[in-house]
Each structure stands twice: as C-alpha cells, then as structure tokens.
Image: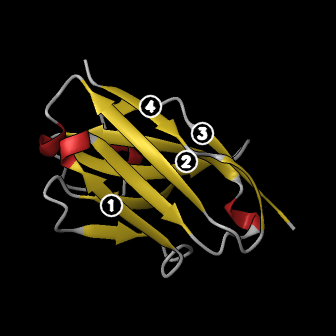
C-alpha cells in the first residue's frame, strides 16, 4: 500500500511563492513517477506537473511553465513543487500522485496512489 501525503500549502498574495512537498511511503520511491494535479470545486482535476522516477523527464502545464518547478529527492522519498510568481488563478487544492510503470504522466487516470491534497489560496 503506497501512502502519499502533501504539505506546504497556504494563503499567499499574488507574486509570492510556495513550495509543496510530497512524502511517499510503502514502496521504493525511486521506482515511482510523481505527478501534481490541482482541482477547484465543480471542475475536473487538472494536470500541473510530473516527473519520471529517474528525474530525467519533466512535464508542465502551459499555465505554469516558467513559474513552477517540479523536482524529487529519492533519498528522502519526497517530491517537490516549487511555485513562484503565484497568481489568483492558481488557487486550488493541490494533489500529489505516484505510480509505477506509468506512461502518460499528464493523465490523472494513470496514477495509482493519491494524497489527500493541500490547499493553495492566492489573494489579489
């Protein structure tokens, strides 16, 4: 049973930064791809960023390119999402997901394990 727990969300003003963490347990972390998704009430879960288990391949949604950076520390079994220059439209619940043998990292349906989410609210 893979367990995923996000942390680092909060309330910030537009233009400021937050760094989210994703702690994974129950399986060798280096064997898992990691993705970040976000969701607002009434909307579908939206892809934000993803990173392969080697860390050699990353993907970003167009809306966050140049502002967000995904990374991982396999020694700490932790993934990260550095969010800079936050905008009000970034406000959402952010979810971390992990899965082995993933091929389409941009799709939420490809991930086996999900965290409970962490809220990010960006004020104007």
Report which residue position mark 4 lands on: 5
Asked if the residues shown at circle 3 and circle 4 are in contact, with their CB atoms under 8 angstroms apart, the answer is no
CA–CA distance in space, label 4 to label 1:
16 Å
Q: Are there few (<14), some (14-19), or many (20+) residues within 10 Å of tag 3?
A: many
Task: Compare marks 2 and 3 and give the one earlier in the sequence.
Answer: 2
Asked if one can make out residue 70 in the rendered structure from this viewpoint, the answer is yes
Report which residue position mark 1 lands on: 71
CA–CA distance in space, label 3 to label 4:
9 Å
Q: In which quadrant of the rendered view does residue 30 lie?
A: top left
For the C terminus, the image quarter is bottom right
Label of residue 118 in the image: 3
Instruction: Give the color scheme: rainbow, by chain, secondary structure or one colour.
Output: secondary structure
Q: Nearer the viewer, mark 4 or mark 2?
A: 4
Q: Position of residue 28 (x, y in %)?
A: 13, 33
Task: Compare marks 4 and 2 and give the one earlier in the sequence.
Answer: 4
Asked if the residues shown at circle 2 and circle 1 are in contact, with their CB atoms under 8 angstroms apart, the answer is no
State the residue at coordinates (17%, 52%): 53
Q: Are there few (<14), some (14-19), or many (20+) residues within 10 Å of tag 1?
A: some
Task: Compare marks 3 and 4 and give the one earlier in the sequence.
Answer: 4
Q: Nearer the viewer, mark 2 or mark 1?
A: 1
Where disc 2 sits, the SS reads: loop
For the N terminus, the image quarter is top left
Q: Position of residue 8 (x, y in %)?
A: 57, 45
Task: Compare marks 2 and 1 and give the one earlier in the sequence.
Answer: 2
CA–CA distance in space, label 2 to label 3:
14 Å
């Amino acid at each position: 049973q893979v367990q995923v727990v996000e942390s680092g969300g909060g309330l910030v003003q537009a233009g400021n930064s937050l760094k989210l963490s994703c702690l994974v347990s129950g399986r060798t972390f280096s064997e898992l791809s990691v993705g970040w998704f976000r969701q607002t009430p009434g909307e579908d879960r939206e892809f934000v960023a993803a990173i392969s288990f080697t860390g050699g391949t990353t993907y970003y949604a167009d809306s966050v390119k140049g502002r967000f950076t995904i990374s991982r520390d396999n020694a700490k079994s932790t993934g990260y999402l550095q969010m800079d220059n936050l905008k009000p439209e970034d406000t959402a619940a952010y979810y971390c997901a992990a899965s082995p043998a993933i091929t389409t990292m941009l799709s939420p349906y490809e991930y086996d394990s999900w965290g409970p989410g962490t809220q990010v609210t960006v004020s104007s």
